[in-house]
Image (cartoon, rainbow, N blue to C red):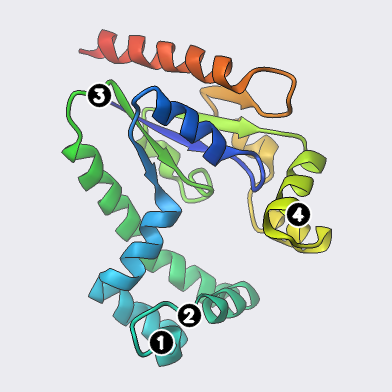
């Protein structure tokens, strides 16, 4: 089985593309969602997060105080670095366990915003990057999150520029409305299936 990554900048449409792959029967590991679950279910992670951010990082009923973490992590680079050092290895191990549990599929997809930034692409067989012009991405996020342009730009600045991600791409999906997403995904799906068959 091929282990494939899929990434793209904020507002690029990664989730939409993943839903199409799922319609073709491909399992998807949503790294951000899994990270959130691990942060409230894995006691070792919980202890380390409390050590970094204090006991107020979690509510009395065990829920993560996302607003506190977001505020402190993005205003303190050292805390963000420490948080990533806790979460990213845990997600990497969880990904591997998930991949090893899969049966009878030609390939799997790991969806994550920071695959390239964390070096995760280096342990994957192939990488798909979903691309869209910045103005389109900004508008999508403004509409989706009901937020202002300045806030979206601030979040974008925390990510690697799209052109840097594209340098590592084996496949690029253009999500600017100029080409059918379903057709682009179908072509990549067929190519990945063919690669998986060749490897066997």
Q: From the image, tell me which residue sits under label 2.
A: 65
The mark nearer the N terminus, 2 or 3, is 2
> Could you tell me which secondary element the residue under label 1 belongs to?
loop
Q: Quadrant of the N terminus?
A: top left
Report how far apart the C-alphas of labels 4 and 3 lie in the structure: 37 Å
Q: Which quadrant holds residue 76?
A: bottom right
Q: Earlier in the sequence, mark 1 or mark 3?
A: 1
| Residue denoted by label 1 | 59
**Residue 194 occupies which quadrant of the picture?**
top left
Residue at image location 65% in from the left, 58% down from the top = 158
Q: Is residue 15 left or right of residue 37?
A: right
Q: Are marks 4 and 3 in contact (CB under 8 Å)?
A: no
The image shows residue 81, relative to residue 152, as above or below, that is below
**Residue identified by numbered label 4:** 142
Relative horizontal placement of residue 133, taking residue 169 as reference (left or right):
right
Q: Where in the figure is residue 113, as x and y percent of width and height?
A: 53, 48
Distance from disc 4 to disc 1, alpha carbons, whole Å, reads 29 Å
Are discs 1 and 2 less than 8 Å apart at CB?
A: yes
Q: Determine the residue positioned at 26% across, 10% down.
A: 197
Q: Is residue 134 visible?
A: yes
Front residue of this view, candidates 77 and 135: 135
Q: Dot 1: within a 10 Å radius of its alpha carbon, few (fewer than 14), some, or many (20 or more) residues? A: few
Question: Which is nearer the N-term, disc 4 or disc 1?
Answer: 1
Callout 2–callout 4 Cβ contact below 8 Å: no
């Amino acid at each position: 089985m091929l282990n494939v990554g899929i990434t793209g900048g904020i507002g690029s449409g990664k989730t939409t593309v993943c839903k199409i792959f799922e319609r073709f029967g491909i399992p998807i590991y949503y790294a951000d969602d899994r990270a959130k679950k691990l942060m409230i279910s894995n006691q070792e992670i919980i202890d380390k997060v409390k050590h970094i951010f204090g006991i107020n990082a979690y509510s009395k009923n065990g829920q993560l105080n996302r607003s506190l973490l977001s505020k402190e992590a993005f205003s303190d680079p050292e805390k963000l670095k420490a948080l990533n050092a806790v979460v990213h290895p845990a997600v990497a191990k969880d990904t591997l366990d998930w991949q090893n549990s899969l049966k009878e599929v030609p390939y799997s997809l790991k969806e994550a915003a920071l695959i390239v930034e964390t070096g995760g692409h280096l342990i994957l067989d192939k990488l798909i990057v979903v691309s869209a012009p910045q103005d389109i991405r900004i508008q999508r996020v403004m509409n989706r999150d009901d937020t202002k342009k300045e806030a979206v730009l601030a979040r974008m600045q925390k990510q690697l520029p799209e052109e840097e991600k594209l340098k590592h791409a084996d496949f690029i999906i253009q999500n600017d409305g100029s080409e059918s997403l379903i057709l682009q995904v179908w072509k990549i799906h067929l190519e990945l299936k063919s690669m998986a068959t060749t490897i066997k």
